[in-house]
Image (cartoon, rainbow, N blue to C red):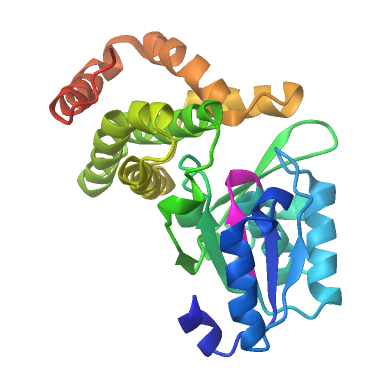
Amino acid sequence: MPQTFENGLRRPFVIASRRQCADEHFRALQEKLDEQDILLSIFSSVEPNPSVETVEKIAAQYKIDSCDCFLVIGGGSPMDAAKAAAACLARPDKPLSQLVGLLKVRRRIPPLIAVPTTAGTGSETTIAAVVTGSDHHKYAISDLCLIPRYAILDPALTVGLPPHITAETGMDALTHAVEAYCNRFCSPKMKAHAMKAVSLIGANLLTAYREPANKAARMNMLTGSYEAGIAFTNAYVGYVHAVAHGIGGLYHVPHGEANAILLPKVLAAYGSAVYEPLARLERKMRVSGGKPE
């Protein structure tokens, strides 16, 4: 992070939850930046499944405060909101609705530093930002320019996660990896990323759930989420995510929980088409010590 600010960035727009802003790690960061006369603008009101209205508020405050970069500390919702706001700032000539879809931004966004506090979305390495419209439908903005410039993986920031959030976000990451791996267009290189993610998540999710302070398991989960993010950014996800986004938008079900419920159902519906790739993933999980009990 110091390297980033040495590159001339002096006014970061921080998106973090109120809990994160009160955390000792954040206060230590704020003190260090104060010593360098680096002023923070802070937004701490991103809701789960961030709305278009929230994104527009972030973009407006960013301009009012004359910020020059984003520092996002949180899970998938803050990162999605930051990416979508950055897209709006890069394309002030277009409303957010016209940026939805693939490669609609096509301009450099403000520098974005992503510090995940959950091990699930992989948003610190993906091209996508998902927001919820006033019609309760989810809309995805996907563009290469939305990939954060820096990602900082610190297991200490995930130690305080409640067990149910550890489980939900971990299943989100696992679903990313499984759907990417089973995609017929997944390249050998992306299959390797997905396989590594499945291995790490399979071997560490239960440990992270049962032992919240286990930093080794937390770091492995962060790495697994990151690897899964790389895989699905290049190989895409499938019907699990398609249905999960709809359920989340309409009923506000946590995304990871929706994925966990849908994954076995959708894989069963795929039938023999996924038997071979799933068998390879299952063998990898057994070898890595992640076989379910």
User: Is residue 274 positioned above or below 216 on the image?
Assistant: above
Residue 120 rendering spot, x and y as whole percentages: 47, 39
User: Is residue 35 positioned above or below 276 on the image?
Assistant: below
Residue 32 rendering spot, x and y as whole percentages: 58, 79
Image position of 181 (left or right of 2): left
User: For the stretch drawn in magenta, what is the main secondary structure?
Assistant: strand
Return the residue nearer the eye: 185 or 23.
23
* Count of numbered labels shown in the rendering: 0
Q: Is residue 101 visible?
A: no
State which region is magenta.
70-77
Residue 250 rendering spot, x and y as whole percentages: 75, 23
Q: Quadrant of residue 213?
A: top left
Residue at 70% across, 38% down: 49
Image position of 89 (left or right of 110): right
Image position of 97 (left or right of 143): right
Return the residue nearer the eye: 72 or 209.
209
Q: Is residue 250 magenta?
A: no
Q: Quadrant of residue 67?
A: bottom right
Image position of 172 (left or right of 12): left
Q: Quadrant of residue 237?
A: top left
User: Is residue 15 positioned above or below 90 on the image?
Assistant: above
Residue at 85% across, 66% down: 60
Residue at 82% across, 74% down: 63
Residue 42 rendering spot, x and y as whole percentages: 75, 65
Q: Is residue 75 magenta?
A: yes
Q: Is residue 26 visible?
A: yes
